[in-house]
């Protein structure tokens, strides 16, 4: 396994974690209405879903890369 592959996977997982950690706040920009609360909830759940999907893809890719070594 090359060093560049390890760096690529590290950057990928940093990107995945940053997607989850970046705060998205509409309440400070708009009036708090039921619509804003619903949109914020949807965005929160989409971020969590994207986090799990991208993590799964990264882990499967990492496993397929290391499969030959095991």
Image (cartoon, rainbow, N blue to C red):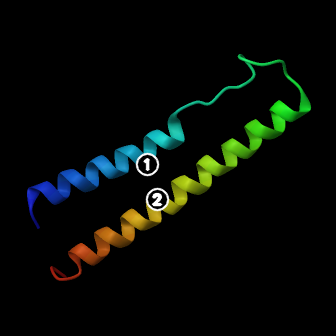
Q: How many marks?
A: 2
Q: Identify the disc placed on residue 42.
A: none
Apparent side of residue 21 relative to residue 33 in the rendered image (left or right):
left
The residue singled out by tag 1 in the image is: 16
Residue at the limit of the structure toward the right, as seen here: 34
Q: Up-down: is 43 above or below 36?
A: below
Quadrant position of the N terminus in the picture: bottom left
Q: Residue at x 44, y 44 (%)?
A: 17
Q: Label 1 to label 2, Cα distance in Å?
A: 7 Å
Q: In percent of the image, x 83 and y 39: which residue is there?
A: 38
Mark 1 Cα-neighbour bin, 10 Å: few <14, some 14–19, many ≥20: some
Q: Residues within 10 Å of mark 2 (few under 14, many from 20)?
A: some
Name the N-terminal-most of marks 1 and 2: 1
Quarter where residue 18 is shown: top left
Picture residue at 37% right of the left edge, 72% below the top: 60
Instruction: Say which quadrant the C terminus sits in.
Output: bottom left
Q: Position of residue 58 (x, y in %)?
A: 37, 63
Q: Is residue 3 left or right of residue 52?
A: left
User: 58 left or right of 54?
Assistant: left
Where does the image place residue 26, in percent across and percent down from the top left? 71, 25
Q: Which residue is mark 2?
A: 54
- Where does the image place residue 10, in percent across and percent down from the top left? 27, 50
Snapshot quadrant of residue 66: bottom left
């Amino acid at each position: 396994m090359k060093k560049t592959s390890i760096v690529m996977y590290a950057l990928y997982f940093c990107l995945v974690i940053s997607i989850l950690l970046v705060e998205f706040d509409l309440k400070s920009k708009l009036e708090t209405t039921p619509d804003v609360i619903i949109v914020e909830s949807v965005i929160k759940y989409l971020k969590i879903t994207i986090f799990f999907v991208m993590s799964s893809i990264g882990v499967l890719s990492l496993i397929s890369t290391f499969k030959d070594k095991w």
